[in-house]
Image (cartoon, rainbow, N blue to C red):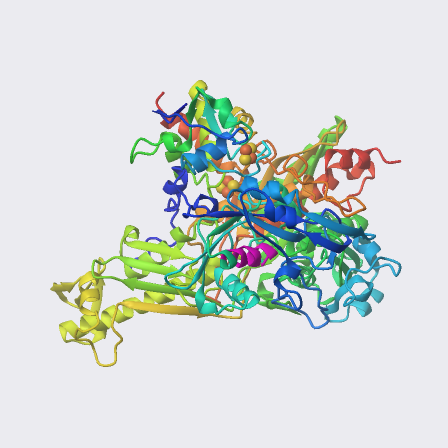
Amino acid sequence: MGSSMMGARIRRREDPQLLRGEANFVDDLKLPGLLHAAILRSPHGHAAIKAIDLSATRAAPGVVDAFCLADIWPENPPAIPVLVGVESMLQCPQYPLAGQRARYVGEPVAIVVANSRAEAEDALELARVEYTVLPAVVDAQAALHPDAPCLHDSAPGNICARWTQATGDAAGAIAAADIVITERFKMQRYTAVPLETRGILATPDAVSGELTIWVSGQWPHTARGITAAMLGLEERRVRVIQPDVGGGFGVKAEIYPEDVLIPLAATRLGRPVKWIEDRREHLLGIAHSREMTFDMELGLRRDGSILGLRVTIISDHGAYLRTLAMVNPSLAATGLTGPYDIPNYSAEVICALTNKSVCSPYRGAGAPEATFARERLLDVAARQIGMDPAAFRLKNLIPPEAMPYATGLTSVEATVVLDSGNFPAALRQALLLVDYDGFRARQAQARSEGRMPGLGICMYTQLAAVGPHESAEVRVDGQGNVTVVSGAAPGGQGTATSLAQVVADQLDVPMEKVRVSFADTARIPFGTGTYASRNAVMAGSAAMMAAKRVRAKAAQMAAHLFECSPDDIEWQDGDARIVGMPGKSCSLANLAQAARPGGSRPEGMEPGLEIRHYFETHAVPFSYAAHLAEVEVDPATGGVKVNRYIVVNDCGKMINPMLVEGQVVGGIAQGLGGALFEELAYDSDGDLLTTDLFSYRLPGTLDMPNVEISHLISPSDLNPLGVKGVGEGGAIGSHGAIANAVEDAIAHTGARVHQTPLRPSVVWALLNAG
Amino acid sequence: MTVNGRQLCAAVPGRRSLAEFLREDLGLTGTHLGCEQGVCGACTVLLDGRSVPSCLVLAAQADGCTVSTVEGLADGDKLHPIQAAFWQEHGLQCGFCTPGFLMTVYEFLLSTHGPTEDEVRRALAGNVCRCTGYQNIIKAVMAADLMWER
Ligand code: FES
Ligand code: FES
């Protein structure tokens, strides 16, 4: 069998439609009789709701419906469930609308449905809500103080979960260490901000009795299950379809109040209802992420070997716990040791509630936070013991002969066993590419001229896909066309192209014959979705195995037709023939025709040249990379320019390196934004200050360097393709690499970097302190 | 108003933005709304040949003007060289920002031949892409400069 497509840089089949402006994002869908929803949101960070009067709203022009929580659920409203929990976790659920208390600015309080979006928004202004403002707490440390206002009676002291994650004896190792380094690092609150906001269109189908929901999401099957359960509907009567998605990066794998409210409105009215989040609502309500503080103690031997690491993580969760609330702190606590040999480790995790928007995974989910804290700490440690930061890392990286390496840690997602790779080789290659020794000489020279270049090193490992399964159906029809239905739900990753490559390879057909569709609960009964860098590993393996089984079935069918043994069938250009008998062959199309119901088949064979395969696994691969960032700080303004960026990446085998590199560079841009300027900033009343794209600044063309990428390839044994996920890696490595580079640039002045973002004003203040 | 070469006449409410008019009234949904705050550039169209954020222009302001949108770029089945270059260089991922970039690039390359990378980066500074990190977009513009006979 030819393997011509695996590893090929193939142009994406998704692109022509997108380039022509003919894609179908949820806001592009039009249905007759369409109504538009708008959401009334709490203007207060913390307030008791005394009364809600929607009478003027209901009477406004164009309004067809308006309701608050009590109108629908006078008691026992359905809560958004937590899907992965930890034992100590307390119940702090969010309901579709705030009832007696609003706990963050932007929390939905009521909904209006009207003939147009403008009328719905006008009518919102007529709603009368009587609030009693309560004291808000917006800082996680402050929330843990005994005198802090309490958000939920169910979580005294505002702690919603607390646990320890450990391996070996960290306390003993630190007590026995020659040198102990103690540091605190803090990462700010920031998030994905996909260019397409969220959007939902729900419509009841009078003919089928089904409710169809189009949603800009990442996990249609999960969304169907939860929405149906919360609305008390039969799951089989709810169909969720994901159209084109303008970026998700994790934050669209969540259940938000609107995911329940819009289908509910459509069901009440018997008409299609659409809601498109505006950018202000997006910044107020989208899952926030990253906000963690790390108090760290690192025990070292005098020669620079790491003996143990002890950490306290305070994770800011915002006002409620939704579906994946525990993922970020769990992956941070199990990711802190990364690619290093740290046998004695313990992390205490404290999850705090604050009057801010609710937190959930964003690209990397705990790993960027942990990586930033660890890599900062390693730089501090190296300086303290007088070692070069690269040499210090090389000394402590897990050597290739120790792989696979079981850390002894298990997160809410998976057991952390680093399956394959050569971490020191990646770092050495990156150092070579940047001409590390030469850089130090250039840096010394530049400093003598008053300039401030810096180089930051960052190594990370990433959980590169999670189970428990992904689905794929591969079907060959009588025309020889191949249809793939996948349970994945991509939003720009190019997964249609990569799955077509995989399937075309297995069936030895031209890629144009293969059509791939996704993310429709009516097309395939189970699906998991797109998050945790899982498409290549999980959807790719499911598609590969389904195609492989279709091929085997086709061989049996050919043997049946030729009256020979399946072992005597060989394939030539996609056609089956008997070994050594070139004259007689049968095309895939003919085999598919022969396999139709009602035809003659081998005993026991199901009709149809089609297979549905579930790739099931709990073992996850880990990919890794070395990131080096070269920056220059402007001493006059504190501005940081990233001039050069080098990545040595290892995500196992690659289906399409062009797509891999696209993911890496895109992720780096997001981490760069986080390191240098992105922040969801609140004032002390819990008011979000960054509600537009001026104040929440995203990286632009002038901020990003060209990234130089090279690959190591350590195939994974955990899936038939040998691949590992890569989607999150760029964002995991770049925040830490750039923060380290900035400190390297200014360290000679005595300035130290303990938190981000490193805006010009912050760097200037560091340079001019004291 | 003339939109992509077609003359049309419509009455619009005063508060209808040009973007809404294109999307809702004309069904030209290739023009995307990423912020409606004038920052992201996803809604960029050409108004009398100049790139503007159509979220900040009222439809009524475009009275009598010529408007070009992404739907007008390709020549039937044949992609415009800028589109072809974006395809070739993997200059898009989710594609939500892409129509705005294409229109900005169209205006830029029409008046600039053989730009430097720095000039390209400056020309595109008003368009945000959250997926690609820009590297392949810049490459695509450099390629389009060579591919587009103009
Ligand atoms: S939508 Fe017009 S600039 Fe963003
Ligand atoms: S390709 Fe997604 S925003 Fe640019």
Q: Quadrant of the C terminus of chain A?
A: top right
Looking at the picture, how far across and down is residue A393, in whole percent? Answer: 68, 53
Choose top left, top right, bottom left or bottom right for residue A19: top left
Q: Residue at x 51, y 37 (%)?
A: B135
Number of disc labels: 0
Q: Which SS type dominates the magenta stretch?
A: helix
Q: Residue at x 64, y 52 (%)?
A: A110
Looking at the picture, how far across and down is residue A102, in whole percent? Answer: 73, 55
- Residue nearest the observer in this picture, B37 or A624: B37
- Residue nearest the observer in this picture, A226 or A473: A226
Q: Residue at x 54, y 26 (%)?
A: B118
Assign ligand 1 to one image quadrant: top right
Q: Is residue A714 visible?
A: no
- Residue nearest the observer in this picture, A205 or A402: A205
Residue numbers of the magenta segment: A255-266
Q: Horizontal placement of A642 versus A305: left or right?
A: left
Q: Horizontal placement of B36 versus A713: left or right?
A: right
Looking at the picture, how far across and down is residue A423, in whole percent? Answer: 59, 56
Choose top left, top right, bottom left or bottom right for residue A295: bottom right
Tell me if residue A265 is in the magenta stretch. Answer: yes
Tell me if residue A529 is in the magenta stretch. Answer: no
Residue that protrudes farthest toward the left in the picture: A583
Choose top left, top right, bottom left or bottom right for residue A477: bottom left
Image height of A54 relative to A544, above or below: above
Residue that protrudes farthest toward the bottom in the picture: A603
Q: Is residue A488 visible?
A: yes
Looking at the picture, how far across and down is residue A367, in whole percent? Answer: 64, 56
Q: Horizontal placement of B132 versus A746: left or right?
A: left
Q: Quadrant of the N terminus of chain A?
A: bottom left
Q: Horizontal placement of A138 versus A600: left or right?
A: right
